[in-house]
């Protein structure tokens, strides 16, 4: 019979996406039997992240300081904002090395049935940034889902009201796909092949 501490560790690991009972058990036993230093490093890093990480005041990505490194980098194109759904999407776009502008992380997408309206995904904060007048283009990098398309169109509409051009990632990203699972080559082509959104 397993100890309660081991049971709790296995149960805790199961909260990770894609990790079932067998995988959690394998991870737990590996860390305890073969890599105790790795287990301590994971525990310390997790505690540090929980205590220190917050959302950037400008883009809402995770960071340790009030403003993240990307927003603080004056060498980046200040006139272009790439709007993404999650911090994982920022990592995916940065890995492609095809974008040198700023970001805005929605932390979700419009889905009234799930309780996600414009306020819940920070669209009021995004509009305030657009009102400052230094943005030329908004790249809409939301997922290729119904909710992602609705979110992109909503943002494109209020960007147009401020005289700002909007573009959507080219459809090299598979329908229903999430940015964090797209390879960097496909993402790079999607960014370079983005298209203007018609305002009719």
Image (cartoon, rainbow, N blue to C red):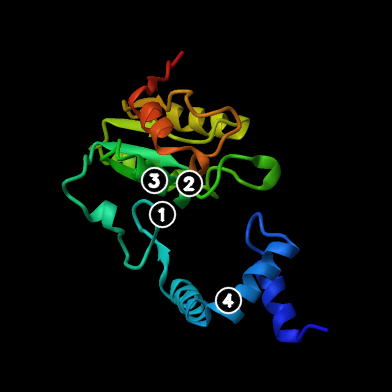
Q: Earlier in the sequence, mark 1 or mark 4?
A: 4
Measure the C-alpha gap from mark 1 to mark 3. 6 Å
Discs 1, 2 touching: Cβ within 8 Å = yes
Q: Position of residue 32 (x, y in %)?
A: 60, 81
Q: Earlier in the sequence, mark 1 or mark 3?
A: 1
Left or right, 112 with reference to 190 = right
Check disc 3: other Cα within 10 Å, few if <14, some if 14-19, many if 20+.
Answer: many
Q: Which residue is mark 4?
A: 31
Discs 3, 2 touching: Cβ within 8 Å = yes
Q: Which mark is residue 106?
A: 2
Q: Position of residue 35 (x, y in %)?
A: 52, 78
Describe the element under mark 3 as helix, strand or loop: strand
Image quadrant assignment for residue 20:
bottom right
Discs 1, 3 touching: Cβ within 8 Å = yes
Q: Nearer the viewer, residue 66 or 112?
A: 66
Q: Earlier in the sequence, mark 2 or mark 4?
A: 4
Describe the element under mark 2 as helix, strand or loop: loop
Discs 4, 3 touching: Cβ within 8 Å = no
Measure the C-alpha gap from mark 4 to mark 3. 37 Å
Q: Which residue is mark 3?
A: 104
Inspect this view and state whether residue 110 appears.
Answer: yes
Q: Which residue is mark 1?
A: 60
Q: Earlier in the sequence, mark 1 or mark 2?
A: 1
Nearest to the eye among marks 4 and 3: give it: 4
């Amino acid at each position: 019979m397993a100890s309660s501490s081991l049971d709790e560790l296995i149960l805790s690991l199961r909260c990770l996406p894609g990790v079932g009972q067998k995988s959690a058990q394998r991870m737990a036993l590996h860390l305890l039997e073969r890599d105790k230093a790795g287990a301590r490093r994971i525990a310390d890093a997790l505690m540090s992240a929980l205590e220190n990480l917050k959302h950037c005041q400008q883009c809402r990505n995770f960071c340790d300081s009030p403003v993240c490194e990307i927003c603080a980098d004056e060498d980046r194109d200040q006139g272009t904002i790439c709007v993404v759904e999650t911090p994982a999407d920022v990592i995916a776009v940065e890995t492609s090395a095809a974008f040198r502008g700023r970001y805005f992380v929605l932390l979700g997408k419009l889905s009234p049935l799930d309780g996600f309206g414009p306020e819940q995904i920070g669209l009021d904060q995004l509009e305030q940034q657009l009102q400052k007048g230094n943005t030329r283009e908004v790249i809409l990098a939301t997922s290729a889902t119904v909710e992602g398309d609705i979110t992109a169109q909503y943002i494109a509409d209020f960007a147009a009201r401020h005289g700002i051009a909007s573009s959507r990632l080219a459809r090299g990203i598979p329908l229903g796909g999430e940015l964090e699972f797209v390879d960097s080559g496909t993402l790079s082509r999607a960014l370079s092949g983005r298209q203007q959104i018609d305002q009719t």
